[in-house]
Amino acid sequence: MSETISMPKLGFDMAEGTLVRWVKNEGENVNKGDVLAEIETDKATVEVESSASGVVRKLLVEEGSVVPVGDPIAVVGSADEKIEETPTKVTEPKAEKKTDESKGEELKTESEEERSKKETPKAEATAPAAQAQPAVAPVAQAAASVQEGSVKASPLAKKIARDNKVDLARLQGTGPGGRVVRKDVEAALSSGQSSVVSRQPAGLPSSVVAATREDETIQLTRLRQAIARRMTESTTSVPHFYVTHEYKMDALMAMRKQINEYLGEDEKVSVNDFIIKAVALTLREFPNLNASFAGDKVIRHGAVNVGVAVAVEGGLLTVVNRNTDQQPLRAISSEVKRMVAGAREGKVKPDDIQGSTFSISNMGMFDVENFAAIINPPEAGILAVGSARQVPVVENGEVKVGWRMKVTISVDHRVSDGAEAAQFLQKLAEFLENPVRMLV
Amino acid sequence: MAKITMREAISQALMEEMDRDPAVFILGEEVGVWGGTYAVTKGFYDKYGPDRIMDTPIAENAIIGAAIGAAMVGQRPIAELMTINFAFSAMDYIVNQAPKLHYMFGGQFQVPMVIRAVGGGGRQLGATHSQTPDAIFAHFPGLKVVSPGTPEDAKGLLKTSIRSNDPVLFIEHATMYQVRGEVPDEEYLIPIGKSKVQREGKDATVVTYSKGLELSLKAADELAREGIEVEVVDLRTLRPLDMEPVLESFRKTNRAVLVEEGWKSYGVGSEVASRIYEEAFDYVDAPIIRVAQKEVPLPYNRTLEQAALPQVPDIVAAVKEVLK
């Protein structure tokens, strides 16, 4: 039985995705779970896995096509199986329903001609175009795997992007009608270079005497646009309130140190891993904060899936750890590490970024005392975590040195109220201040 | 280098070649006693006499037919058409006989003939006497079509045309005889089929020829005042068309405006644009724009005539458009 693979929905507001690259070509073997293609959404480039094992019989869309969610993109079946006519909902014009036999013939001839035309420039002078096997076409296209198909860009912009491996879809065109032109690609290239330069140890600013700089207009990337849209939507439609709490972190810091003594360099657990686990356990007891507002209802999610905000180039993504409340600390730690690395490389799996029920934004590494985060709809809350720092504290009338950390919870007021949020933070203290409770 | 007019440059070329080669002779309407409608052959009749400067009846097919016959038997005739609009009366000879005789007769005959023709509008000569049908003639393999935009090029190219063993249609623009330019004092030849960068720039490429060159250089001056540096490439020869300087320039600027005086449809600009798309597709950063004559028979009324012809502001606007 052949199985049709469709454009997955990789986020609640995703309507379509760009098929950037086929990883498997027609005729290749594929196992369930193998990466079939790379798809780009507003948020990121993600890998689509095959939901079936067998042979890739048909790739239904070309690289670069924008495909609505749910539309078929490929057919996986057995090698000798007869594949049905292409599934009905296909975006390509080629797949128009044949009205009669002769017209069908015409269509076929045309597309074969097109194919051989495409082949001709690449074929050796001695090789007649007619010999080009139909199967060659997708391969040839895969070789020139540039993510430019549906992007409006000048031929020159496309070439420069291709030569420099720039993803055109991430650029904003400044030409007429938003066309990406040479200077847009060059601007992206030079800004990329300058960011590389700026990451080097700073020393003194080189331009102590320098004159003022010119104004610069920076076009938003698609990721940035998505962030802009979502955050505006959140702050304008979700009534936020904020509650801040300070935690004694001495026990947790000591335990972390102790645990990490037994772990290798790339396995070490972070303060944030503890916080993720503690938040998940606390949410278990506060189902109303592990929820989504839905008009005249609140949906309390059965699973506790904790999202972790990750700073990536030009924006941020939320990677999702599933069933966090049921996972041991080290499992959470290694899973989040993997997803964060993927997000920073611009490659995450669909499951990595969808389905969170509550989020954590930790800026502890930036020496932040405290801050408030914007809720990531449709979640009902987000926890903003500051740095754990050594400060003078008063205990039993004496000033001592202690580890303290402030967190602020932002909550959707349509779902919950201050008292519940404060109780949540108190409950969280039971885990953060007595971390051994997380391990039993 | 002397600064002379286009008229003087053409006149010098004719005279130098007539002095050099006794096989060269001129025939046409009013070329002799009157000295040419545009006074290009003034004084020739007295110098060379009626055997080499032949006034003809008003019969263009006879002029070109006679020239072809003379060329086939070893003479080097220069046939003058008072305006290129009259070429239509001799169309069979120009596009169907002269360019094909060498081919049809297996190389037994050559047709070393030059047809000098005056083209272009802007002198209120009405719709039938003001046309720029250059592209029509450039369509036919076998006929070389030359149309210079400076006195230096006119002289060098005309001398080469006279020495060519193939028929050459040499198109002069009716409003450019008074254009002045520096011309080398010593003898020189300019090869047919070589385009030339007449002004260097980096922001956009303007491809043009003949009257279009004059307009484009003025437009380039205006644009330079706004900080826009256009490179102006002069085709000089429409067939064979030398695209190399055009492509080289385009690969640098990635944007092009094509300027011609003829109508836009099926024109020289269409050909150049296609060649750029075919041969430099990966360098295209904006759609190429053609500036050409409005698609109407050219009006007699001066204001309307000027409105229908391409003008400097049209070129300036087109350059700004491709730079968007």
Image (cartoon, coloured by chain):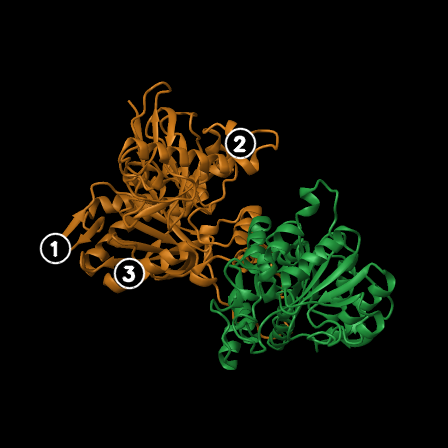
Chain colours: A orange, B green
- From the top left corner, tell me how far across and down residue A440 is, in percent: 30, 36
Q: Which mark is residue A233?
A: 3
Residues at marks 2 and 1, common chain? yes
Rate crowding at label 2 as few (under 14), some (14 to 19) or many (20 or more) other CA atoms within 10 Å.
some
* Among the two numbered marks 2 and 1 on one chain, the one whose residue lies closer to the N terminus: 2
Write down the quadrant of residue A207 in the picture: bottom right
The picture places residue A343, in percent across and down from the top left corner, at: 43, 45
- The residue identified by callout 2 is A129
Tell if the residue under mark 1 belongs to the same chain as the one under mark 3. yes
Nearer-the-camera pick, B247 or A248: B247
Measure the alpha-carbon separation of dots 2 and 3: 54 Å
SS of the residue under disc 1: loop
Chain letter of mark 3 equals A
Circle 1 chain: A
From where the camera sits, is residue A210 visible? no
Task: Identify the image quadrant of residue B248.
Answer: bottom right
Binning the other alpha carbons within 10 Å of mark 1 as few (below 14), some (14 to 19) or many (20 upward) gives: few
- Residue bearing mark 1: A296
Q: CA distance from mark 2 to mark 1?
A: 64 Å
Sequence-wise, which precedes: disc 2 or disc 3? 2
